[in-house]
Amino acid sequence: MSSVANNIKRFLEEIPDNVQLIPISKTKPDEMIMDAWNSGYKIFGENKVQELCRKYEELPKDINWHMVGHLQSNKVKYIAPFVHLIHAVDSYKLLKIINREAIKAGRTIDVLFQLHIASEETKFGLSADELYSLFDTNEFQDIKNVRIKGVMGMATLTSDELVVGKEFGRLYKIYSEIKDRYFRDMDYFSEVSMGMSSDYKIAIREGSTMIRIGSAIFGYRN
Ligand SMILES: *Cc1c(COP(=O)(O)O)cnc(C)c1O
């Protein structure tokens, strides 16, 4: 078994059944993805539209592709026909554009809202208050071709596990509050995408349902 396929197998054995593994294949060659595909794993994530589209074109069409990185409005059209889940919606404007492109593609597109939970200024994402006020707008009812499945966030890049745990805990709390207030009867609103190679164990402990694992599966990136 190749090392990529083996790493995926080890993750699947380690994580609870209710947590989905999203291997992040960014910058890695098609052959590595095919190693995993040949072993039966067909879910991958990318963070750049251009690379995602190229891989979608070249690789088998039964792969579920997740877009996990920051998404520019003018690029939504390229991924709308095939993307399985968009993890990082961070504005109402972007949501409307995804809805428009989903209509054009004749699809409903699943998305997560990215929340800003880290202390770093540079990370993208909405604050909890921004998200609550977004849900309170009436216009929201017009968004029919986008299905909001939950939230996503990235913790501060630090070795301090207490800090990371607190940030993930806060993200889970915001998720629960939003579920209570706006999605109480919607079973599909059930995802908390948090945890990467360095902090997935903490994320799972804090309630993650999707971990996005790059380097621990595919090896280090330059
Ligand atoms: C690259 C990336 C990951 C995976 O990062 P690793 O530390 O390599 O596991 C997860 N989420 C996003 C948004 C990424 O861009």
Image (tube, rainbow, N blue to C red):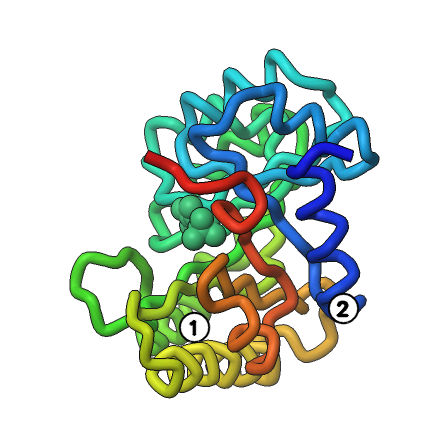
Residue kind at label 2, given as amino acid type = Asn
At numbered mark 2, what does the secondary structure look like: helix, strand or loop? loop
Instruction: Give the percent coordinates (x, y) of residue 4.
Output: 65, 38
Indicate the quadrant containing the N terminus: top left, top right, bottom left or bottom right.
top right
Q: Which mark is residue 36?
A: none
Q: Which residue lies furthest to the left in this view?
A: 121
- Tell which circle, 1 or 2, labels the residue nearer the N-terminal end: 2
> Which of 215 and 138 lies nearest the eye of the viewer?
215
Quadrant location of the C terminus? top left
Q: Is residue 152 above or below residue 181?
A: above
Which percent across, then down, holds residue 148? Answer: 58, 57
Who's the residue at 32% across and 80% down the image? 160
Q: Mark 2 points at which residue?
A: 18
Q: Is mark 2 within 8 Å of ligand 1?
A: no
Tell me if mark 1 has few (under 14), some (14-19) or many (20+) residues whose alpha carbon lies within 10 angstroms of its own. Answer: few
Residue hosting label 1:
136
Q: Is disc 1 placed on a helix, strand or loop?
A: helix
* Type of amino acid at the residue the image marks with label 1: Asp
Circle nearer the viewer, 1 or 2: 2
